[in-house]
Amino acid sequence: MPDHVIQPNKEALIKRLNRIEGQVRGVAKMIVEDRYCVDILNQVSALQSALDAVAMQLLENHTRGCMQSAIQSGNGDAAIDELMAVVRKFAR
């Protein structure tokens, strides 16, 4: 499988990840400031949701790009195996 692909919506993904990075710094600051645990946990939950959204976008990009190309070129079984291994990681 290729180790280098061009993401179709790279700018949007980077913007989301930059926002997530800022949220992580915010959570760290909340801990430093001894903020209420539930408030911190709510922010951690929001972070997890934001990361899940990035992962789903990447999964969609992979399916519509890499997977589609692999299937068309006759390498569908290997691509499906790889995809399922990744999906299992998110299903835990």
Image: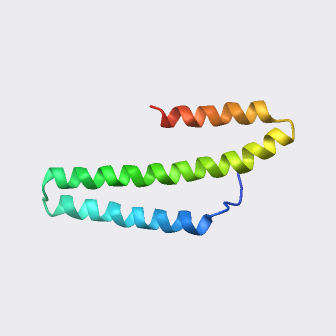
Q: How is the image coloured?
A: rainbow
Left or right of 34? Residue 65 is right
Quarter of the figure that contains the N terminus: top right
Q: Is residue 41 above or below residue 71?
A: below
- Residue 27, by quadrant, is bottom left
Left or right of 91? Residue 26 is left
Q: Position of residue 75 (x, y in %)?
A: 82, 36
Left or right of 74? Residue 22 is left
At x 12%, y 55%, the residue is 36
Which of the pair 48/2 is nearer the observer?
A: 48
- Residue 79, by quadrant, is top right
Q: Position of residue 29 (x, y in %)?
A: 23, 64
Total marks shown come to 0
At x 15%, y 64%, the residue is 33
Quarter of the figure that contains the C terminus: top left
Q: Position of residue 54 (x, y in %)?
A: 51, 54
- Residue 5, by quadrant, is bottom right
Q: Position of residue 56 (x, y in %)?
A: 54, 48
Which of the pair 54/31 is nearer the observer?
A: 54
Which residue in the rendered view is the most extreme toward the right? Answer: 73
